[in-house]
Amino acid sequence: MALTMKDMLKRENVQIVESCGDWKDAVRIAVQPLVDGGYVKPEYIDGIIENADKLGPYFVLVPDLALLHARPEQGVIKKQLAITVLRHGVEFKKGEPCRVLVTLAAEDSDSHIDVMKILANMFADPAIIKAAATAETPDDIFKLFIEFPSN
């Protein structure tokens, strides 16, 4: 059975934050709901930061959007997404602020593929990213992701 966005995203994992100190602070803030919910261990945060220190900001996929993730063995307990919107974006790459941070916790390399396809379709449309970045409430962001067509 194909995973849906409803399977991977819980409302309590969607947040709007005014600003953060730097990109490492943004990673901590964005991953924290998954730590609090028991989806990842605290070291998952360290894994994302260490990977970015080594590889650069590999998770910035398109302008204004980062898909934060590390390897399953870096602290994933069970699969889940979290979405953080930073009102004042953070720069992972010089001069390119990101406002929409989607954190992925994947237990393995394939079980989340169905949801990744939905996200790829969403993120192919800059208007969807802008809608998430400028949403008024976390409920609006949650609704945007949950109601996006999965075809």
Image (cartoon, grey):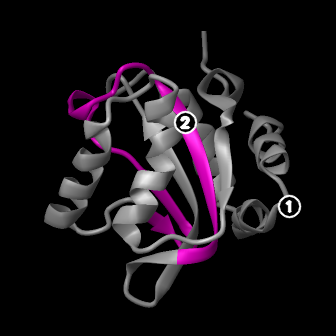
In the image, is residue 63 part of the stretch drawn in magenta?
yes
136 lies left or right of 41: right
Instruction: Give whichever of 75, 109 is nearer the camera.
Output: 75
- Tell me where residue 67 appears, x and y as whole percent: 47, 53
Whether residue 113 is visible to the viewer of this picture, yes or no, is no
Q: Which residue is mark 2?
A: 81
Looking at numbered disc 1 in the image, what kind of residue is underneath it? Glu
**Structural crowding at the residue carrying mark 1, measured as other residues with C-alpha within 10 Å and reported as few (<14), some (14–19) or many (≥20):** few
- Tell me where residue 123 appears, x and y as whole percent: 63, 57
Whether residue 147 is visible to the viewer of this picture, yes or no, is yes
Q: Residue at x 58, y 72 (%)?
A: 19
In the image, the segment drawn in magenta is 60-89
Q: Quadrant of residue 133?
A: bottom right
In the picture shown, does residue 132 fall above or below 113?
A: below
Q: Separation of disc 1 and disc 2 at Cα? A: 20 Å
Q: Quadrant of residue 6?
A: top right
Secondary structure at numbered mark 1: loop
Instruction: Give whichever of 20, 126 is nearer the camera.
Output: 20
User: Where residue 52 is drawn, which disc sits there?
Assistant: none
| Pair 1/2: label in front | 1
Mark 1 or mark 2, earlier in chain:
2
Secondary structure at numbered mark 2: strand
**Structural crowding at the residue carrying mark 2, measured as other residues with C-alpha within 10 Å and reported as few (<14), some (14–19) or many (≥20):** many
Q: Residue at x 85, y 61 (%)?
A: 136
Looking at numbered disc 2 in the image, what kind of residue is underneath it? Leu
Instruction: Give whichever of 97, 61 is nearer the camera.
Output: 97
Tag 1–tag 2 contact (CB < 8 Å): no
In the image, is residue 88 part of the stretch drawn in magenta?
yes
Q: Residue at x 44, y 74 (%)?
A: 21
User: Where residue 136 is drawn, which disc sits there?
Assistant: 1
